[in-house]
């Protein structure tokens, strides 16, 4: 299924109207979590902000470690949007994809976004010690 058709099927499943802009972008709120989609050169980018990066070197190191081989990011890339001072997460899809597979990938992505948003929101000391209410996350612990 082509990416615009996947986006339209998602809109139908969610019961919303969802149109891609002229530049191939759109966004969806899942509760309070905004997920952005961008189609560019036969790729679908799924993106989200995780939280402020300023003064959070501890979180930057933790995210880099988590992103190693995608093991704790649901196979997404973690980064910093320096201009906006935000940690970000991005999953890039290529090739033909059935809607059911797209939905599984998106479900995992939203779960991972929620995990990291909660972790980044913790006070520095609590997140550094690992004594938080945020459960450990790895590719095997999230079920879709």
Image (tube, helix red, strand yellow):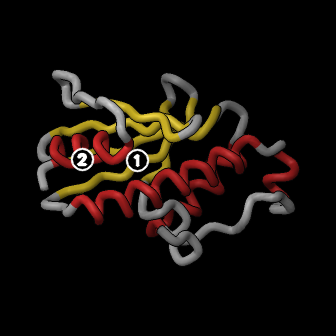
The N terminus appears in which quarter of the rendering?
Answer: bottom left
Q: Position of residue 122 (x, y in %)?
A: 79, 45
Label 2 vs 1, first from the N-terminus: 2
Q: Work out how far the residue at label 2 is from the one at label 1, CA to CA, in angstroms.
A: 21 Å
Q: Dot 2, how many residues are within 10 Å of its Cα: few (below 14), some (14-19), or many (20+)?
A: some
Image point 32% across, 38% down: which residue?
37
Q: State the mark number for residue 110.
A: none
Q: State the mark number for residue 9.
A: 2
Horizontally, residue 18 falls left or right of residue 80, namely left
Q: Position of residue 49 (x, y in %)?
A: 52, 37
Q: Secondary structure at mark 1?
A: strand
Q: Residue 105 falls in which quadrant of the image?
A: bottom left
Horizontally, residue 142 falls left or right of residue 131, namely left
Q: State the mark number for residue 90.
A: 1
Q: Dot 1, how many residues are within 10 Å of its Cα: few (below 14), some (14-19), or many (20+)?
A: many
Location of residue 16 with respect to 114 vertically, above or below? above
Image point 24% across, 28% down: which residue?
19
């Amino acid at each position: 299924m082509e990416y615009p058709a996947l986006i339209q099927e998602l809109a139908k499943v969610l019961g919303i109207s969802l149109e891609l802009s002229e530049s191939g972008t759109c966004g969806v709120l899942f509760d309070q979590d905004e997920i952005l989609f961008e189609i560019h050169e036969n790729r679908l980018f799924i993106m989200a902000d995780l939280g402020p990066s300023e003064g959070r070197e501890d979180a930057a190191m933790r995210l880099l470690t988590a992103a190693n081989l995608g093991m704790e990011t649901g196979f997404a890339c973690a980064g910093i949007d320096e201009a906006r001072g935000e940690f970000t997460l991005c999953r890039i899809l290529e090739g033909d994809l059935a809607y059911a597979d797209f939905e599984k990938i998106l479900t995992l992505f939203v779960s991972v976004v929620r995990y990291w948003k909660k972790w980044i929101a913790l006070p520095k000391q609590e997140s550094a010690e690992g004594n938080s209410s945020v459960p450990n996350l790895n590719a095997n612990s999230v079920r879709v």
